[in-house]
Image (cartoon, grey):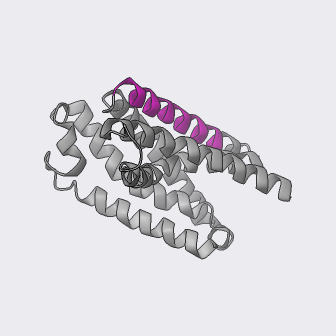
Amino acid sequence: MLFVLLGIFIWLCVLMVKICLSYFPWSDTQGFLVLKQDVVHFLPWQWAFKIHVACSSLILLAGFTQFWPAFRQRFPLWHRRLGWLYIIAVLGFAAPSGLVMAVYAAGGLATQVCFVILGILWIGSTVLALKYAIQKRWYKHRNWMIRSFALSLSALSLRSWKLLLYQLTPYIDGLSPKLIYQLEAWLGWVINLLIAQLIIYWISHKK
């Protein structure tokens, strides 16, 4: 099961990298940008999008190494370096740019509020993970890193929910593209956070 999950994660990361690379060199008619013609030429949004896309794959790969026990034990220095890379990429670039994009999110107020909450929780959980690492309170650091990385994975899970919801459209009346986008936005991080809490509960009680 572990190898299956690892394989799924790697496949999704490769897919994410391919999606991110497709936006460089810049073209305002590429992929997701086709749907954002109302803001694609607005420089604050455009730069926020570029920063967010450029950091996303880096965050996923750096974050994954933090939960690989063999890597952490064999290469503790690289564990710390990649941990700092994750922290800086999230707090310095990805989360702030995500908040800018959230204000202009498609789908109306429901998705705008959704992505703003996601950004705030992402920043908060990452700050707390850093705080407890500095204090050497490793269990709390681990728990908040689990939550932070679960929110980072919303970039992958959101797209997975999108594929599933579109498969359900022939069977559910009223499942419009706008509603699907609203649902995938919320499901993309809420379910991840619930799973993170279950993992934390399981690890704590196992010990």
Query: Residue at point 62% right, 67% down?
Result: 68
Give left or right: position of 142 versus 90: right
In this view, 24 is above or below 103:
below
Q: For the magenta stretch, what is the residue range?
A: 108-130
Q: Give x and y (percent) for residue 79.
A: 60, 62
Q: Quadrant of the C terminus?
A: bottom right
The residue positioned 47% from the left and 61% from the top of the image is 61
* Nearest the eye: 178 or 65: 178
Give the quadrant of residue 35: top left
For residue 169: magenta?
A: no
65 relative to 132 in the view: left or right: left
Q: Which residue occupies the foreground of this view, 159 or 46? A: 159
Q: Main secondary structure of the magenta part?
A: helix
Q: Nearer the viewer, residue 164 or 30?
A: 164
Quarter of the image that includes the N terminus: bottom right
- Assess whether residue 119 is covered by the magenta stretch: yes
Q: Residue at x 78, y 56 (%)?
A: 203
